[in-house]
Amino acid sequence: MKTQFIDLSSPLWLQTLENLRHDFYHLPGYVDLEAKRIEATAEAILITDDNKIFFMPYLLRNCNDLFPETVDVFDVISPYGYPGFLLNEAAASTPDFLISILEHLRQVWCDRNICSAFLRLHPILNMDVSALAAENDLFTVNGETVSVDLTLDRDEIWRKTRSEHRTKINKCKREGFSARIVSVSEYINDFNAIYEETMNRVGASKLYFFGLDYLKKIADVLGEKLHLCIVELNEEITCGGLFTECCGIVQYHLGGTKTSFLKQAPSKLMFDHVRFWAKERGNEVLHLGGGLGGSQDSLYNFKAGFSKQRHTFVTMRIIPDETKYRRLVELRANSLKIEFEQLLNTDFFPAYRFLS
């Protein structure tokens, strides 16, 4: 196997993506933006074996932000969203290739003082991995996500919509609500205000507050791959959503609704508009995502009303260096004044970043 670590300055990153079906999560500009947001380093790994290709971007964090006494011990996480990894057709059709890659990853990351990796897989591009989750303890099934199959005809998409959603969509139209795709740069301030109002209303973690500056940067980075849909009533914006478009995959990224319009549920009209807009542009799937942390909560139930198509949401938890990992867990347990085994066995991963 040939292994290459790719930084943002290397043209190999984009050259590799040219030959692989990918999503916006894999673009170097997006990974760089996420790295700056959490003060990490953007990196990708490319592993080739004959004609088989494995590619994965990630964020590299130095653990001395938690433990100043540690020197150059790192961990790996995914950028925000569902990046996962990419395989070419030859790799995807070789059943044992991915297993051998995972063992190889352990070794090459261990050699670089990386003690843990937490990676969110792509529910569509990595959909075949779900079968491995029951057989390999590196994989964890975290729940389901929802998507709309845009290859179906319009009538079939509408028929697969929950009746309560169809009623609300039609009512919104009768009451004068209208949805449209608008210029991201022109309406980004309005969207940010609605988004932050929504996050405050639901008591969201600070992790979900990105800020206007970040939104402007992601618009610059993604360019024509980022779209904003708004729903208006009497020229007032009632809700909005950011959607990405890449390689036939449309992703719902961020969205919100003004509190004063929650009862009318204009976001249902927004998703209805976007799915048919995306279909007309030749896309194959609109991925709506799932509930918080993969749970089947009210958010999941809302999204599930737009389609019967489901995907398994899988994460990977890799410990390349068990000794370093356990040492960090021990340090964290001491700082929290709890037992080492109690912290080690928590569902939170990596355990040494629990409550950090």
Image (spheres, rainbow, N blue to C red):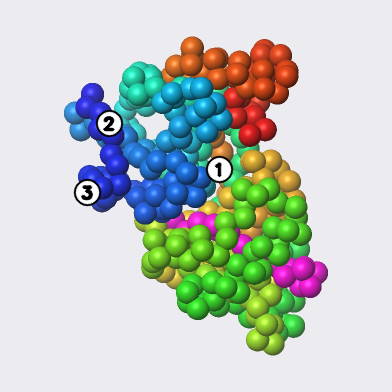
* Picture residue at 20% right of the left edge, 33% below the top: 51
**63 within the magenta span:** no
Which quarter of the rendering shows the N terminus?
top left
Instruction: Please tell me whether residue 320 is drawn above or below residue 268 in the rendered image.
Output: above
Q: Amino acid at mark 2?
A: Ile
Mark 2, secondary structure of its residue: strand
Q: Which residue is mark 3?
A: 11
> Could you tell me how far apart the alpha carbons at marks 3 and 1 are, in whole angstroms?
33 Å
Q: Which residue is mark 2?
A: 47
Given this view, does label 3 or label 1 mark the residue nearer the observer?
3
Nearer to us in this view, 22 or 135 = 22
Q: Are marks 3 and 1 in contact (CB under 8 Å)?
A: no
Q: Which residue is mark 1?
A: 311
Q: Earlier in the sequence, mark 2 or mark 1?
A: 2
* Mark 2 nearby-residue class (10 Å; few <14, some 14–19, many ≥20): some
Mark 3, secondary structure of its residue: loop
Hey, which quadrant is residue 236 in on the image? Answer: bottom right
